[in-house]
Image (cartoon, rainbow, N blue to C red):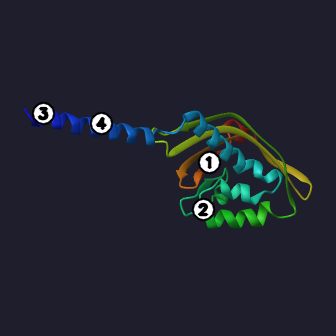
Amino acid sequence: MNGVPRIAHILAVCSGALLVLATCSRPPDPAAERAEVERVVRASIMWALDKDKDLLFSALAHDEDFFIFHPDSASTIASWAEFEQLTDRVFMNPSFRAVRSELRDLRIGISREGDAAWFRTYLDDIGEWDGVESGWLNTRWTGVLEKRADGWRIVQMHFSFPTERCATE
């Protein structure tokens, strides 16, 4: 019987240690995580209004996992290097000017583990090239983010137009 109190003491100490570990590794606040994901999503599109390339690059994954499906097959981006070249060639070109971007019905989900997120929204994104306005209206935009050591980063995006729009054009 002498061993029973000792075992109880060890269990109590271990339970206390587990409680401390559980407290230290509490999952992040879901509302705060969603707000940060929203900030990153908005930064990835709104950066163009001021041509703040640093803001854009802070929102995206800088590796071979980075991927974008655009509505046309020719504009698919399959790596960070491709995106970086596109940014310099098109968006940083003096002929390009962002006019406005608007997100509607933005919905964000966070994984149970808190290391992945996804979003969906409707996007109006209007710009000019040499003063001629063009852009996307009511575009469906979805994406996946990963929480990395330096914060949330968009890893994949997909833009599409409703088929009804395509049939009328």
Residue 94, percent across and down? 87, 63
Nearer the observer, 91 or 31: 31
Q: Check contact, mark 2 vs mark 4: CB within 8 A.
A: no
Task: Name the secondary structure under disc 4.
Answer: helix
Write down the residue under mark 1: 158
* Numbered tag placed on residue 4 in the rendering: 3
Callout in the foreground (2, 3): 3
- Residue 118 in the image, given as x and y percentages of width and height: 56, 42
Three-letter code, disc 3: Val
Comparing 164 with 95, the one in front is 95
Mark found first going from the N terminus, 2 or 1: 2
Cα separation between marks 1 and 3: 61 Å
Q: Position of residue 14 (x, y in %)?
A: 28, 40
Q: Which amino acid does label 4 sit on?
A: Ser
Tell me if residue 152 comes above or below residue 13 in the rendering: below
**The C terminus sits in image quarter:** top right
* Circle 2/circle 3 CB separation < 8 Å: no
For the residues marked 4 and 1, what is the alpha-carbon distance in whole angstroms?
47 Å
Q: Is mark 1 on a helix, strand or loop?
A: strand
What amino acid type is highlighted by mark number 2?
His
Residue ID for mark 2: 62
Secondary-structure class at tag 3? helix
Label number found at residue 118? none
**Dot 1 surroundings within 10 Å: few (below 14), some, or many (20 or more)?**
some
Query: Which residue occupies the foreground of this view, 146 or 26?
Result: 26
